[in-house]
Image (cartoon, rainbow, N blue to C red):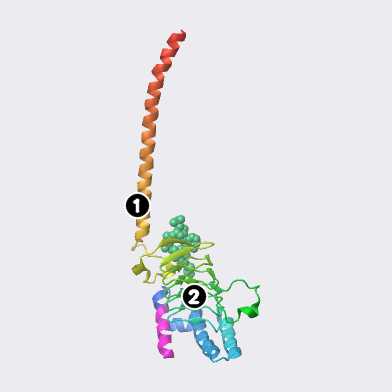
Amino acid sequence: MVFKELREDIAAYMERDPAAKGPLMIVLCYPGFHALVFHKMAHWLWERRLYLAGRLVSHLGRMLTGIEIHPGAEIGQRFVIDHGNGVVIGETAVIGDDVTLYHDVTLGGTAPSVDSAAQVGQKRHPTLEDGVIVGSGAQILGPITIGSHARVGANSVVTKDVPSSVTAVGVPAKVVMPRDKEKAREFQAYGTPSGDCPDPVLQTIEALRQQVATLAERVEELEDELEAKEDKQVAPAAKVRRKKVG
Ligand SMILES: CC(C)(COP(=O)(O)OP(=O)(O)OC[C@H]1O[C@@H](n2cnc3c(N)ncnc32)[C@H](O)[C@@H]1OP(=O)(O)O)[C@@H](O)C(=O)NCCC(=O)NCCS
């Protein structure tokens, strides 16, 4: 069972990291994979209320990989952390299947100054549904939900729920475009669609931009024509006035 899961995890790295050259490389050289193995052990201990042992295993994992995953965090199948350094995943975070994180991502809590005893057992960290991709440096804070197959842009700060199958970017993060729900199910390395598969929404926006540019040119032409006509009408009137004065 555990070996089947690990085989699936390795296959997920092969599938999602264009730089992966073989399963052995992943087993030996991928800190994200190592952190996941440590987390599986730490979580197993945590669930059996062996809190100190769980925390120690997760601490060891953090020292060796630079990735901090609290042993209480729930993580689904085929979870990939690419590069990984600086990733922090909080105690009550929940991560679905086929989720991908890049380095320096925080799945953190908010309001750390609030009475910490009252927060025990409360959900304080985010939930990432299946297929979510989170770009490097993104901070996802609080007990919010990132809907399935959504993408969070690099360095974004997310403090509100994000719907399924959309892209959220910026500080604070805003949805920039809806995605085709079927296309969104396919994994795209770095969350970015490849050039030979253009996004239909972007294509529509581009077509609209071109139409607006054509209309603007036409309006300019009409304004020039109108101005020329007005000049012609003004010129004879001025001549008549000059004759009267003379
Ligand atoms: C968010 C992301 C997935 C969007 O990719 P995309 O679908 O190709 O989208 P586009 O590049 O067409 O961007 C759409 C809009 O969002 C903006 N945008 C994209 N990523 C952004 C980001 N991280 N922060 C702020 N704005 C961003 C673009 O400027 C563009 O805005 P515009 O229409 O006003 O010009 C991608 O930009 C991203 O951040 N991927 C993560 C990459 C990463 O972490 N790599 C690390 C690998 S080591």
Q: Position of residue 1 (x, y in %)?
A: 41, 91
Question: Which residue in the protein does label 1 denote?
Answer: 207
Comparing 149 with 12, the one in front is: 149
Q: Nearer the viewer, residue 160 or 74?
A: 160
Mark 1 surroundings: few (<14), some (14-19) or many (≥20) residues within 10 A: few
Residue drawn at x 35%, y 65% as measured from the top left: 180
- Mark 1 to mark 2 CA distance (whole Å): 37 Å
Instruction: Say what secondary structure mark 1 lies in.
Output: helix
- Asked if residue 27 can be seen in this view, the reply is yes
Q: Looking at the image, is 200 positioned above or below residue 2?
A: above
Q: Amino acid at mark 1?
A: Ala
Q: Residue furthest top?
A: 246
* First of labels 1, 2 by sequence position: 2
Q: Which residue is mark 2?
A: 127
Residue at 40% x, 88% y: name it. 4
Q: Which residues are magenta?
A: 1-13
The answer to which of 101 and 76 lies nearer the viewer is 76
Q: Secondary structure at mark 2?
A: strand
Residue at 44% x, 90% y: name it: 2
Residue 9 in the magenta stretch? The answer is yes
**Discs 1/2, front:** 2
Q: How many marks?
A: 2
Q: Amino acid at mark 2?
A: Thr
Q: Quadrant of residue 244?
A: top left
Residues at discs 1 and 2 in contact (Cβ within 8 Å): no
Residue 150 occupies quadrant: bottom left
Whether the magenta-drawn stretch holds residue 109 is answered as no
Q: Residue 135: x, y in percent?
A: 48, 68
Placement of 232 over or under 8, stated as above or below: above
Residue 139, percent from left and from top: 54, 69
- Which quadrant of the structure image shows residue 16? bottom left
